[in-house]
Amino acid sequence: MSDHTEMKQVDMNYKKDRPKAKNPLKIEDLSLRDGHQSLFATRGRTEDMIPVAEKMDQIGFWAVEVWGGATFDTMHRFLGEDPWERLRTLKRYFKKTPFSMLLRGQNLVGYRNYADDVAKLFVKKTVDNGMEIFRTFDALNDFRNFEAVVPVIKECGAHFQGCICYSLTEPRLGGDVYNLEYYIQKAKLLEDMGADSICIKDMAGLIAPYDAYELIKALKANVKPMIHLHSHFTSGMSPLSHLKAIEAGVDIIDTCLTPYAYRTSHAALEPFVMSLLGTNRDTGFDINALADINEILERDVLPKYKHLLDDTKVSVIDINVLLHQTPGGMLSNLVNQLKEMDALDKIDAVYKELPRVRKELGQIPLVTPTSQIVGTQTVNNVLFDTPDERYKMITAQVRDLCYGLYGKTSVAIDPEVQKKALKGYSRGETPITCRPAEVLEPELEIARKEIGDLALDDEDLIIYALFPVTGKKYLLQKYGKEKVPDALKPITLEDVAKQKEMIEKAKKGELVEKSKIKEAPEKSGNIRTFNVFVDGDYFEVGVDEVGGSPVITYAMPV
């Protein structure tokens, strides 16, 4: 149990130029990547990062995460931005703070495994454009999926941060799969691969405070690289878990500036700055400088994105994560799938089936893309299975998983499920045991021939190689061969003000000019009475045409 051994009280000093703490906590800021990805559908634009970039550079962050994850896809697809240009632009403002990105192992910044030639060129060009820290993860914690990218990261002189995706077998740390020994062994593998730091990547906010303490203590005792904790706020536990991790001696934690914090994002930075004052782990940050940045964001930036915030719930905590140990976004997807099939009444059956499917598919961590794989198959089982047959409708992604295209699962996939999934599978019915990318043919030269002169450099080529359909469309727009749709253009503060004015008018009933109220006219002799039925009730209504003319003219008998 915690004994606060790594936390010591020192003389309190509130000044911004106070003496440096003996063991200051390092902070990576995620606002400009995971913050807006979690809260605002990854729609953050480069132009809206520039107003705070120089000020953020003065804070003293260990790193700022500005790229990777879903940003590469969203920038070219929905924002009409060149992903590479964001790196180059922000680098002009961040002169001291290293850049960090989220790299999905062999998936890079896409949703499938790419060939080795694509992976290697991607890493090289990313470093060329200003990236310094590669936070590298694999959804299955199969580090063979790092083997193509890590040597290039190291050769380029960049920082390789190896991630272990945090998952649970039980409601808390322990059980026969995801126990303390599992994480220690994974950390040792990353150390052997040359990791400069090791990150516990808690995608759903599952790590409990005392588990965080024990895990960080164990990792610090067993491996030499710096230990980094990344835990989403979704369940509400992350601030508590971070604090216990700090007590255990964690080197680095992830936070967001307050406007980008909480809900499915991360804990806010500012409470940690104040909480650690007067301790040997004081961050050294100037809280007033952070307040200035927050004011700019609240006033000049986030009004443009407020409409993207999911405000369907009042609560900022999703307790479903605590109940089912699944990421909040995954649960939302399950609900949406059931709604589309008019089967929302099956949600309890889905919750019951979910852990069973996950176990049969190898007790895999639930993170992109495995959370979608398990979730969709669970819905299929609930809707289409019969008492005599399970897995009647198996998705293509489950077949790929059973074949080994995503990597090796933590425990063996159920043999019967695997056999059924691979029956008639196009690549063969015997699962592979090699590194998944070894069965992939080189892709770069094929992509180069397909895109032709439209790709003017390797950066353009990579956009196309990763996203052939949307990537090509973006390049056509980039070079003026197609018009950029209005939907891709940014919202301005003037647009926000107009929308707000319209909403206020609508609330007051002022959108349509009210007709002037006149005195009721006299009834004519042509008025007719109708029965009007409303929800089982009926009303007698007199109808008289304006001007007194007959409402209905009947034909005279002949």
Image (cartoon, rainbow, N blue to C red):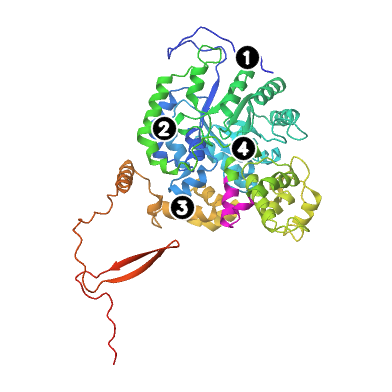
Report the residue marked by disc 2: 92
Residue 6 is labelled as: 1
Q: Secondary structure at mark 1?
A: loop
* Crowdedness near tag 3: few (<14), some (14–19) or many (≥20) residues, C-alpha within 10 Å: many
Report the residue marked by disc 4: 321
Q: Amino acid at mark 3?
A: Tyr
Please tell me which residue is depicted at 68% across the width and 35% down the height of the picture: 167
Mark nearest the camera among 4 and 2 is 4
* Crowdedness near tag 1: few (<14), some (14–19) or many (≥20) residues, C-alpha within 10 Å: some
Q: Secondary structure at mark 4?
A: helix
Q: CA distance from mark 1 to mark 2?
A: 38 Å
Residue 491 picture location, percent across and down: 36, 45
User: Between 505 and 482, which is closer to the camera in this rendering?
Assistant: 505
Does residue 244 appear to the left or right of 185 in the view shown? left
Q: CA distance from mark 3 to mark 4?
A: 37 Å
The residue most toward the top is 11
